[in-house]
Image (spheres, grey):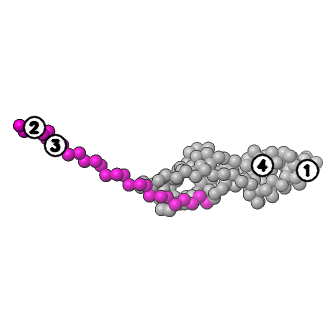
């Protein structure tokens, strides 16, 4: 019985509250107007692309950037920021009761108390400027001076 109590105590001390209650990943929803844009997500373990509307699962501690492109529209780059969420902050604070300093360290390292903003990522793509018409050059025969 004594070893069981020690295992429970160790588990509590080695896990962060936010890590347990919220997890270390979150889903980011991506949408565009018009839909059908290619979304390239950087900052994930492996590069990820999808066609809007779509969603991607990312680590809460990752620096995420979403690049949207569609033929005929200006590309958009959206860097996401990380903020402590209400429930993440509560989980992080719960470490004072259960996880202690070790739990706080786990939550800080995994980003478990953080959420990416904006989420969902919603972008209105702007039409690309039309290309100017090609310049047509007329070839004229050289003038011969008349005397």
Foreground: 120 or 45?
Answer: 120
Image depth: mark 3 or mark 1 in front: 3
Q: Which residue is mark 2?
A: 145
Residue to which mark 1 is pinned: 5
User: Which range is magenta?
Assistant: 120-147
Tag shown at residue 140: 3
Q: Assess disc 3: are there few (<14), some (14-19) or many (≥20) residues with their C-alpha within 10 Å of its C-alpha.
A: few
- Label 4, label 2: how many angstroms apart (C-alpha)? 88 Å
Asked whether 23 or 89 is in front, the reply is: 89
Q: Which residue is depicted at the point 12% across and 39% down?
A: 143
Q: Is residue 63 magenta?
A: no
Which of pointers 3 and 4 lies earlier in the amino acid sequence?
A: 4
Mark 2 vs mark 1, CA separation in Å: 110 Å
Residue at the (74%, 54%) spot, across then down: 84
Q: Is residue 102 visible?
A: yes
Instruction: State the mark number for residue 107.
Output: 4
Which disc is residue 43 wearing? none
Pointer 3 or 1: first along the chain? 1
Q: Secondary structure at mark 3?
A: loop
Question: Callout 4: few (<14), some (14-19), or many (20+) C-alpha neighbours within 10 Å?
Answer: many
Mark 3 or 4: the one toward you = 3
Q: Position of residue 104 (x, y in %)?
A: 82, 48
Q: Nearer the viewer, mark 4 or mark 2?
A: 2
- In the rendered image, residue 142 lying in the magenta stretch gets the answer yes
């Amino acid at each position: 019985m004594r070893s069981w109590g020690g295992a429970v105590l160790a588990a509590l001390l080695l896990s962060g509250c936010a890590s347990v209650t919220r997890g270390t990943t979150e889903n980011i929803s991506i949408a565009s107007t018009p839909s059908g844009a290619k979304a390239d997500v950087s900052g994930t373990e492996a590069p990820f692309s999808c066609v809007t509307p779509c969603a991607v699962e990312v680590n809460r501690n990752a620096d995420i950037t979403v690049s949207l492109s569609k033929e005929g529209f200006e590309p958009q780059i959206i860097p996401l920021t990380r903020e402590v969420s209400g429930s993440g902050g509560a989980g992080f604070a719960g470490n004072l009761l259960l996880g202690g300093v070790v739990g706080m360290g786990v939550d800080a390292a995994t980003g478990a108390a953080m959420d990416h903003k904006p989420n969902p990522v919603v972008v209105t793509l702007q039409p690309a400027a039309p290309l100017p018409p090609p310049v047509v050059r007329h070839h004229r025969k050289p003038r011969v001076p008349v005397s």
